[in-house]
Image: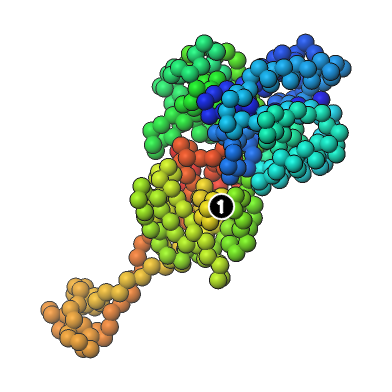
Amino acid sequence: MFIGIDDTDSERGLCTTYLAAVLMERLKPLGEIVGRPKLIRLNPCARYKTRGNAALSFRLESDRPDEVRELALKTLLELSDFSGMNTNPGLVIADEVTESMKAFYRRAVTEILEIAEARRLLDLEGIWYRGFKKGRGLIGALAATGAELPDFTYELIAYRERRRWGTSRKIDEESVWRADALTYPGTWDTVDHHNNRIVFAPHSGDPVLFGIRGSDPQAIMQAFRIIKSEPVERSVLYQTNQGTDAHILAGEIGSVRESQSYRLHGFVAEPARAIAKGHLFFPLQEGSALINCAAFEPTKNFRGVISQLKAGDELEVYGSMRDGCLNLEKINVLQLAEQVELSAPLCPSCGRRMESAGRGQGYRCRTCKTREQGRVQHVLPRNLEPGYYEVPPCARRHLSKPLIRISGDLAQSVHPAR
């Protein structure tokens, strides 16, 4: 049995991952959990998402399907926040994962899907499901159930005791920095060195205490043992599509669509301009097609890279289309345009800078009396190197692949944000 759940939380509290964690424990008397549960992030451009737009799924072997469905439904009704305006829970339990379900997952990560599409596929495949209120959670529940992960990472999520929900989290910050120092790059996005922030714990009233992300389960467990905090009620290590760029489509500037995420090639048409609140914008051009790219204030030091771009720089950019603008997640500087400056020549005899001899009369050295006809070009140094640059951990989207995960020949040209 493949069980998928989505859209059970609200901005005020609860959490779909917590519901899944509780359900897996409750189902143990009825069967055996097979493999790791999956934490699936869907299209980050979805307008009705709550926080990270996550859906959950796991596989259960059981010969008591009716009891499993009854218990899953009871748990969803108990641990969903139905008071949330945008909370529309969905529960899916399938006997198998079909190619149509896998295709639905891939679309859910890169497109905006309709509830009716999910219902049609569920009915066509004969899958048991329950949707509540508008039933929007059926989209994520079905997508998570069909998720196939050619690339994946892990996240260990630790949950709070119920009596502490809504109170300030108690986490020893020094132990978090120590855990990062001892387990990076097996773990990442636990802290943000440049902005001196811990970024692995939420600030909302939901049951999550913190989440440790990484590519190495052993490093994640080591970090978990090092971190000191308030008591942990339970913890689960999820397999996830986070940090994989699963949402990124290869595209061209002239054919991008709203609410989708792309990798685009082009040339900087003009240097970045700043507007109020510190947001930076620059146009990227490929042929006659032009698109506006943005590095918003929350991307912090990433804007320092964007501010150094010059007209003619060749880039590959990664980001999501929102309101006609590409919101940048990272860039790859392929080639820097040469910047030149004209200046008076140097005297070949004494090496001093020559002075103008008068309009149209070239330049002369006042000391040596030597003459030169015109100004000379100097190539200006650039404080930017070719390669990949990314937003800092405090601004990173769940799905965006951190540069520390790039390996092979490309690893020589990455500039990870720490």
Between 42 and 366, the one nearer to me in the picture: 42
Write down the quadrant of residue 214 in the picture: top right
**Given the current orientation, which residue lies at the most extreme bottom position?**
360
Between 219 and 42, the one nearer to me in the picture: 42
At 51% from the left edge and 40% from the top edge, which residue is drawn?
Answer: 396
Look at the image and tell me whether residue 218 can be seen: no
Q: Tell me the SS state at disc 1.
A: strand
Between 256 and 313, the one nearer to me in the picture: 256
**Given the current orientation, which residue lies at the most extreme left position?**
367
Between 308 and 298, the one nearer to me in the picture: 298
Image quarter in which the N terminus is found: top right
Q: Give the labeled residue for mark 1.
A: 321
**Residue 365 relative to residue 103: left or right:** left
How far across and down, in percent of the image, does residue 44 sit?
59, 42
Look at the image and tell me whether residue 398 can be seen: yes
How far across and down, in percent of the image, does residue 165 sit?
51, 16
